[in-house]
Amino acid sequence: MNFIEVQTKQHKKEFNDFAARLYKDNPYWIRPLNKDIEIVFDETKNPLFKQTGGKNSEIKAQAIRWLLQNNRGETVGRIAAFINPKTVLQDNEQPIGGAGFFECINDEKVAFALFDKAKKWLQERGMEAMDAPINFGERNQWWGVLIDGFDKPPNYQMGYHFEYYKDFFEKWGFQEYFQQFTYGREMYDVSERLQKIANRVMTREGYSFSHINKKNIDKHAEDFREVYNASWGNHAGVAKLTAEDSKALLKQMKPILEEDLVWFAYFEGKAIGFYVMLPELNQLFKHLNGKFGIWQKLQFLWHKMQKKNNKVFGVLFGVSPEFQRKGVELGMVVAYQKERKKYLNKKTSYQYNYIEFNWIGSFNTNMVKLCESLEAKKVKRHATYRYLFDRTKPFERMKEIN
């Protein structure tokens, strides 16, 4: 077998086409947009490449990817390895690198060769552990291997995988660091009990709830950053957002963002919570075969105008710690629910009737309880694995946050 570092235009094409061939007979897999994959590895478009390790400024962002081919020159696997300077030493007992974008034929030797390649590259750069499969970027994209929910299509920028991948990871020696749950529910009203809890905070002096206004995207980006860093930025493996990061994230979302799907909670004018939902775009992108040129954009707009997607997915949920367990989360859910009713009461066509809450970490007991209180059911599970290079070191799962 022969490893080829992905460098040329043809290599990049094969990196994406290999996955399409691998899943061609699977009715649930949806091909990601090629551009969404390529942005991750583009030094001019992925802001992570400009980052350093702060106090550990000698740690630079690095990423590499390979194709693995057999003796006949046929691609049998692919993998990427990377070092994220923002998280490599954050709350870790050892420097941790990552591997991701793993795809492989059903052959254990091929899978193990791919894992070995990523491990060797990371070891040569001073890493002492490897998380996989993860993204070279934010956690809400391309993170985790699917371990349950194989009869459901993936949400936008989430992975769909074969059942045998889990065995490959675990047999090679990876240990489960945490799971990510996807919860789903029809968009009926929350229970009367929960509405009463939400109404108490919604009518309390100083509290307000409003959806995003695209004309004020920079202001909302700063609101988002403040809440994100307060609610998520101190957790292991999660990097705090800079002002540049949050602006880039919201501007990236802006073309697909619908104002009534993104909500903020405020106390005395200060942002204390956000609830970000997006149209589930894979229901539209599945028609485009990974491309997004002029013709595909026209197709996308046509399908969008036909209102062919009925699902939204919750991308991010956050509440500043001092305002947690006060009903703020429910307040944002009910605020959206009331906005949705305006459309229904006017008998205006409203296309969304199902929501999936994406990326609920098994370590986040508050969010798990919230989803279950909303009568949402687990519909998919992904796993994030960790491998310690020193096999004598004790392994610990991700600590729960409360």
Image: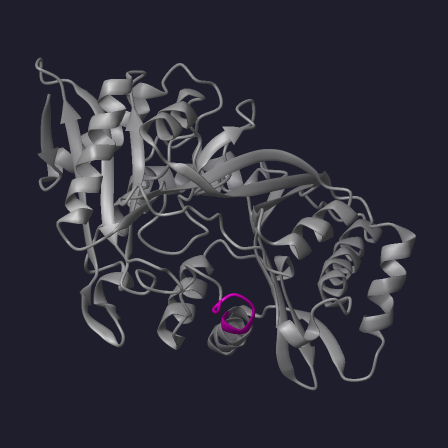
Closest to the observer, 67 or 21:
67
- The answer to whether residue 293 of the structure is visible from this angle is no
Quarter of the image that includes the N terminus: top left
Q: Using the rendered view, name the quadrant where residue 77 is placed.
A: top left
Region rendered in magenta = 229-234
Is residue 232 highlighted in magenta? Answer: yes
Residue 387, horizontal then vertical, whole percent: 33, 42
Residue 158, horizontal then vertical, whole percent: 45, 40
Relative placement, left or right, of 154 versus 184 is left
Q: Residue placed at 45% from the left, 21% from the top?
A: 163
Q: Is residue 355 above or below residue 67?
A: below
Q: Is residue 154 above or below residue 83?
A: above
Is residue 56 highlighted in magenta? Answer: no
Colour scheme in use: one colour
Closest to the observer, 230 or 37:
230
Q: Residue placed at 19% from the left, 58% from the top?
A: 43
